[in-house]
Amino acid sequence: QVQLVESGGGLVQAGGSLRLSCAVSGSIFGIKLMGWYRQAPGNQRERIATITGGGSTNYADSVKGRFTISRDNAKNLVFLQMNILKPEDTAVYYCHARSLEQLAWYEWWGQGTQVTVSS
């Protein structure tokens, strides 16, 4: 079992910044990939950033150059620094983990945190 708890969402004006945090606990040693997804009303959940255990990152084109994913392995935290926010970034943001345990892959999700960007 892996538990993910997001924090840091809120209301911000366009052009502003927010930093989301994801606290990771449980069976963390099997986690191979961490990421952030978002889902706006009426839209499918979208993967926006991922980071491997080795620190390799990948971003959706819609956030590339504005968002940065990072991790603090000592504190079991994953961050999403969001800069130059736009109204279209408004969504519920979810922390995600993919773990490998006993040759089986598992997906884990946090409860989500709301980010609202006003124009």
Image (spheres, helix red, strand yellow):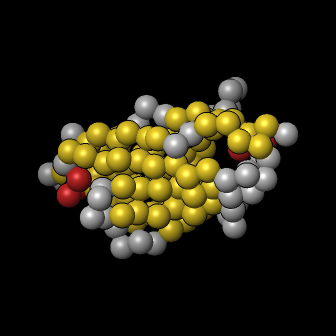
> Going 30% across and 44% down the picture, which residue do you hit?
106
Q: Looking at the image, which residue sits at the far left?
A: 102
The quadrant of the picture occupied by the C terminus is top right
Residue 84 or residue 102, whichever sits in front: 84
Residue 114: percent from the left, percent from the top?
58, 33
22 to the left or right of 104: right
115 to the left or right of 35: right
Q: Looking at the image, which residue sits at the far right?
A: 119
When asked about the image quadrant of residue 64, the answer is bottom right
Residue 7: percent from the left, percent from the top?
47, 41
Q: For the image shown, how many numbered marks are present on the structure?
A: 0
> Going 79% across and 37% down the picture, which residue do you hit?
118
When asked about the image quadrant of residue 30, the answer is bottom left
> Going 41% across and 56% down the picture, which residue do you hit?
78
Residue 82: percent from the left, percent from the top?
63, 55
Residue 107 or residue 74, whichever sits in front: 74
The relative height of residue 24 versus residue 5 in the rendered view (above or below) is below
Residue 53 visible in the snapshot: yes
Residue 102: percent from the left, percent from the top?
14, 51
> Going 68% across and 27% down the picture, which residue do you hit?
41
The relative height of residue 93 versus residue 71 in the rendered view (above or below) is above
Residue 88 visible in the snapshot: no
Q: Looking at the image, which residue sits at the far top?
A: 42
When asked about the image quadrant of residue 66, the answer is bottom right
The quadrant of the picture occupied by the N terminus is top left
